[in-house]
Image (cartoon, rainbow, N blue to C red):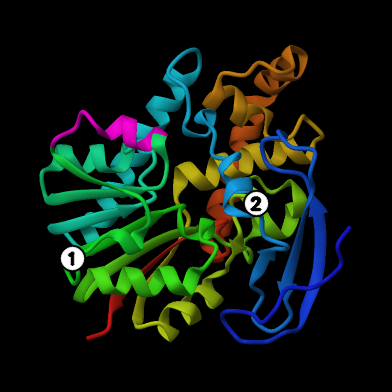
Amino acid sequence: MNNSAPAVCPICHSNSWNFLFETHDADLCSKHNFQLYVCSECNLRIVHPQPSADELAAFYHEYYYGTEGGLGILQKYFKSIAGAIRTRIASRFVNSGRLLDVGCGDGSFLNACELKGRYELHGQDLSEISKKRFMANKNITYHHGKISAITLNQYFDLVTLWASFEHFSNPIDELLQLRRLIKPGGGLLIMIPNTLGLQARLSFKNWFHLDVPRHLFHYDHRNIQRLLEQNGFLVTNVQHGMVEHSVYGWLQTLYNILGFRFNLLYRLIKHGQNENTIQNLLQLILMPLMICISLALHFFEIAFRHSGIIIVMARRNE
């Protein structure tokens, strides 16, 4: 195990790091373990050493974006609900204009926005798989490649990042690129896992939203606000909890804690992989009880503003 600590923290500039733990990748597709460190000053958590771009590419396989067959139909249904919820949240923040979804993946959010007809829609992603899924839709402008390659300066009224920001290896550089694209006074909406939430605190390495190594940085509601305001944004609201992510996060996390194969339910639904029939049957038997417990924990963490998922809304400074 490499015990060398990371360099300077990108948020507070401290070089005081504590080793948290070593863990496997979220999909159990690699024999390599990954180390997490936490900044002792601002609580930023980081995968260190960070994988190279080529190494990371192996973790964005086709199954990561979901399959159409088997239980992929159920995954598609969940994504349509999530897309509708996200559209409602985005429209309450900025209800019309030009919208860019960064890390748009399979396009479920943009497809939901398209049904509302409120925005000029743009999506960005690095994935060839994402590119193929967007080729047939002429109502959405797709930008394949890095954010820095988009030349539409001060063009967008709203930029959204739904579970994308934590994937950036250079968050400050990407924030500055996003600021370049947003109109003065325009909106930036970021949904990220919250390391100060109850899910993370109670589950440690069993936390579903840990998603190592794809999640390179791990934030909380305080240090993400600090990072944004250091780089030209004013945070206007932090929303705790998003029902489909929080409840499912609890459900899969609880199964992980109980000793089931890591993220087994997630891979069954998203990838259609039946890796262990007996464990899948046991999860199915327990599911009514586990859903009730997950719902109760979801409402509890929202009441105390310690949700496993947060949505940060910010405006670009003039």
Inspect the image, locate mark 2, and give the three-letter code of the amino acid beneath it: Leu
What is the x, y in percent for residue 283? 69, 23
Inspect the image, locate mark 1, and give the three-letter code of the amino acid beneath it: Asp
What is the x, y in percent for residue 133? 32, 30
10 Å neighbourhood of mark 2: few (<14), some, or many (≥20)? many
Indicate whether 299 appears above or below 185.
Answer: above
Q: Is residue 224 magenta?
A: no
Give me the C-alpha separation between circle 1 and circle 2: 31 Å
Indicate whether 118 appears above or below 115.
Answer: below
In percent of the image, x 24 and y 39: which residue is there? 112
The residue to which callout 2 is attached is 210
10 Å neighbourhood of mark 1: few (<14), some, or many (≥20)? many
In percent of the image, x 79 and y 48: which residue is there? 33
SS assignment at label 1: strand
Magenta segment, prevailing SS (helix, strand or loop): helix
Q: Which one is in front, 37 or 113?
A: 37
SS assignment at label 2: helix
Q: Which residues are magenta?
A: 129-138
Q: Which one is in front, 38 or 89?
A: 38
Is 123 placed left or right of 173 in the picture?
A: left
The residue to which callout 1 is attached is 157
Q: Quadrant of the N terminus?
A: bottom right
Indicate whether 16 appears above or below 38.
Answer: below
Number of marks present in the image shown: 2
Tell me if I can see residue 121 in this picture: yes
Is 100 placed left or right of 174 in the picture?
A: left
In percent of the image, x 67 and y 60: which residue is there? 50
Quarter holding residue 91: bottom left
Tell me if I can see residue 293 in this picture: no
In percent of the image, x 55 and y 59: which residue is there? 307
What is the x, y in percent for residue 177? 34, 70
